[in-house]
Image (spheres, rainbow, N blue to C red):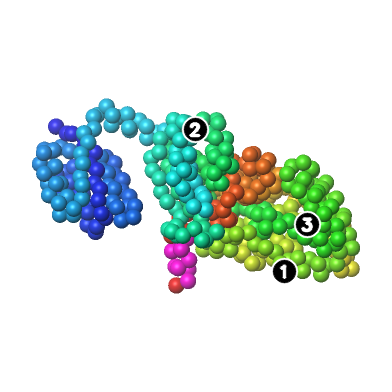
């Protein structure tokens, strides 16, 4: 006769607890049907779903002896075959990863997200912290925190919209991905440049040098918000730069403000062997500067025509617009021999939407409202290195990789 029992172990974490408990279960020839363990602030929680063929009473007595040795608590919950079969059947249910990001994660954040999860009839299988230890004092304005939920079930069509409302209300970011094989095997990441890798729009900086800053910045804002055709607006804006000396490009390039977390992100991606690309509606001159600075593999952008040391007010063909960005991403995936599902695209403007749509994971980064609502995922509160969390990379994983590379 066999009996099913859930064995729950809790208490201060000490070396040898798991080894001792499982050895004892082995002595009783117990089959392990499921097992899970976590440690939070030196407190151990260990759960074992066991199929016991011998005497439960003898097993319990032996376990209690071990519990006194380690000063831990052990509880037992009988499991019926019916409930076990039901649990087995649920293992085929769809699974999703929900990533919660904030400067500091509060109980109210977890509560609000959990309520949305519950209202959508989803089960939380696991919650894991991906970020490093959060400082006790709130004096680091660039701190970041992240926890990852493993969910079981099928989200409703309004699930994402409900989460977007929370993000706006609570100043948090939440991303939801299907937990499939591609999520763990992304290989190529493509970035927009202006207002994504850097904090400014280069064309606005050039326009300021040319004395037409206000006029150009207004057109840029409308184009990025999706109110104007990007190609036509680009040609219009560049025409206003006619006569600007070539030396102005060097001046602007020397003061490009990097987006928070950019250096850390690319250092990690390069160490881990990811391929990276700039696919930008901006300009090659500045793309080449960033490519060299961040060690980026591919760079595609628009080329300003220059004659006799001055901008002519024209852009050389072909123009990299929204459609071209998507085409380039497809071509790079083919070149690298990977599926589009293994690509990530990151951008902020309306001209990035096509690229975000074809990528396996499209992320609207500090984006305009239209882009944030249309893209599958968005980050609005943290820096670029928070993308690592959406890839399932923990802070300690990235740190270990950097240490290994420096040895």
Viewport quadrant of the C terminus? bottom left
Q: Find residue 372 and report its image quarter.
A: top right
Instruction: Give the number of the mark in front: 2 or 3.
Output: 3
Which numbered disc covers residue 155?
2
Q: Find residue 123 and report its image quarter.
A: top left
Magenta span: 398-406
Along the polypeptide, which appears first: circle 3 or circle 1? 3
Under circle 1, the secondary element is loop
**Which residue corresponds to mark 1?**
254
**Which residue corresponds to mark 3?**
204
Compute the Cα span from label 3 to label 1.
Answer: 15 Å
> Residue placed at 33% from the left, 50% from the top?
38
Dominant secondary structure of the residues highlighted in magenta in the image: helix
Tell me where residue 325 appears, x and y as whole percent.
Answer: 70, 48
> Residue placed at 77% from the left, 45% from the top?
222
Along the polypeptide, which appears first: circle 2 or circle 3? 2
Looking at the image, can residue 50 be seen? no
Tell me where residue 152 appears, x and y as whole percent.
Answer: 42, 36
> Residue placed at 59% from the left, 53% from the top?
189
């Amino acid at each position: 006769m066999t009996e099913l029992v859930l064995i729950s172990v809790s208490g201060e974490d000490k070396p040898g607890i798991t080894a001792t408990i499982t050895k004892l279960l082995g002595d009783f020839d117990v089959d392990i049907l499921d097992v899970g363990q976590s440690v939070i602030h030196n407190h151990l929680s260990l759960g074992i779903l066991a199929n016991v063929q011998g005497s439960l009473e003898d097993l319990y007595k032996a376990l209690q002896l071990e519990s006194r040795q380690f000063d831990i608590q052990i509880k037992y919950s009988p499991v019926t075959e019916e409930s076990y079969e039901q649990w087995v059947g649920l293992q085929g249910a769809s699974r999703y990863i929900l990533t919660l990001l904030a400067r500091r994660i509060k109980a109210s954040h977890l509560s609000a997200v959990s309520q949305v999860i519950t209202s959508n009839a989803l089960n939380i299988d696991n919650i894991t912290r991906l970020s490093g230890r959060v400082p006790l004092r709130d004096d680091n304005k660039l701190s970041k925190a992240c926890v990852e939920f493993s969910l079981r079930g099928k989200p409703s069509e309004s699930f994402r919209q409900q989460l977007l409302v929370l993000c706006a209300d609570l100043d948090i970011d939440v991303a939801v991905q299907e937990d499939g094989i591609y999520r763990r095997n992304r290989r190529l990441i493509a970035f927009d440049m202006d207002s994504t890798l850097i904090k400014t729009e280069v064309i606005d900086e050039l326009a300021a040098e040319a004395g037409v800053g206000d006029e150009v910045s207004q057109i840029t804002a409308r184009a990025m918000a999706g109110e104007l055709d990007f190609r036509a607006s680009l040609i219009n804006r560049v025409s206003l730069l006619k006569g600007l000396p070539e030396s102005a490009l060097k001046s602007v390039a020397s003061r490009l403000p990097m987006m928070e977390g950019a250096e850390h992100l690319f250092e990690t991606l390069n160490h881990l062997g990811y391929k990276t690309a700039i696919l930008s509606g901006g300009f090659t001159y500045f793309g080449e500067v960033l490519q060299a600075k961040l060690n980026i593999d591919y760079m595609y952008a628009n080329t300003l025509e220059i004659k006799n040391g001055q901008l002519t007010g024209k852009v050389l063909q072909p123009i990299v617009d929204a459609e071209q960005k998507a085409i380039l991403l497809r071509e790079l995936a083919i070149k690298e021999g990977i599926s589009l599902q293994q690509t990530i695209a990151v951008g902020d403007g309306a001209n990035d939407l096509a690229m975000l749509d074809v990528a396996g994971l499209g992320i609207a980064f500090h984006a305009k409202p239209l882009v944030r609502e249309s893209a599958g995922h968005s980050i609005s509160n943290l820096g670029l290195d928070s993308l690592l969390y959406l890839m399932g990379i923990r802070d300690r994983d990235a740190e270990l990789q950097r240490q290994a590379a420096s040895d």
